Amino acid sequence: MLKLTRKVEYALIALRHMQNKEPHAVSSTKEISEMYDIPLELLAKTLQLMARGGIVNAVQGPTGGYKIKAKLENINMIEFFEKIEGPLGLMDCYFDSDCTLISACNIRSPIQKINDNMRSMFENMTVGEITQ
């Protein structure tokens, strides 16, 4: 079954939370974790990934936290997924050709068509659309 990972879900929840605050307001990991009942450690790692990916800014200090850095309407969902989870593909052979079955595989082409269509759909969606 194709579904979003918890990290992606939590990242979207955090972005929507930050988006609904005053401009330049900072949201702490603890605040978001408690409000949405998200495991603190996983949320912290997810926010750090988004900071490294240039989506949010990490603000240091006792009143620190995170705030949105990037224009979410300029980040397509493929970019977002890949910043959080790495390459997006239904099967490993879509982005990694080290599969030992690749020479005899009879489903690679049809799966690649599905994957291409899925990627195209997500390339035309922005994070801003999802978090509105």
Image (cartoon, rainbow, N blue to C red):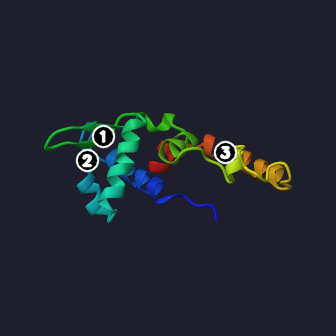
Tag shown at residue 67 = 1
| Residue receiving disc 3 | 119
Query: Between 104 and 123, which is closer to the camera in this rendering?
Result: 104
Query: Cα distance, mark 3 to mark 1?
Result: 28 Å
Is 103 displayed left or right of 80 in the figure? right
Of the numbered discs 3 and 1, the one sitting upstream in the chain is: 1
| Residue receiving disc 2 | 27
Number of marks? 3
- In the rendered image, residue 80, in percent from the top left (x then y), is placed at 51, 42
Question: Is the residue marked by circle 3 packed among few (<14), some (14-19), or many (20+) residues within 10 Å?
Answer: some
Q: Residue at x 28, y 38 (%)?
A: 58
Query: Cα distance, mark 3 to mark 2?
Result: 31 Å
Query: Cα distance, mark 1 to mark 2?
Result: 6 Å
Q: Is residue 100 visible?
A: yes
Quarter of the view holding residue 62 = top left
What's the residue type where badge 1 is placed? Answer: Lys
Q: Residue at x 64, y 65 (%)?
A: 1
Query: Between 16 and 2, which is closer to the camera in this rendering?
Result: 2
Query: Between 93 and 71, which is closer to the camera in this rendering?
Result: 93
What's the residue type where badge 3 is placed? Answer: Arg
Q: Is residue 124 visible?
A: no
Is 53 displayed left or right of 58 in the figure? right
Of the numbered discs 1 and 2, the one sitting upstream in the chain is: 2
Of the numbered discs 3 and 2, the one sitting upstream in the chain is: 2
Callout 1–callout 2 Cβ contact below 8 Å: yes
Question: Is the residue marked by circle 2 packed among few (<14), some (14-19), or many (20+) residues within 10 Å?
Answer: many
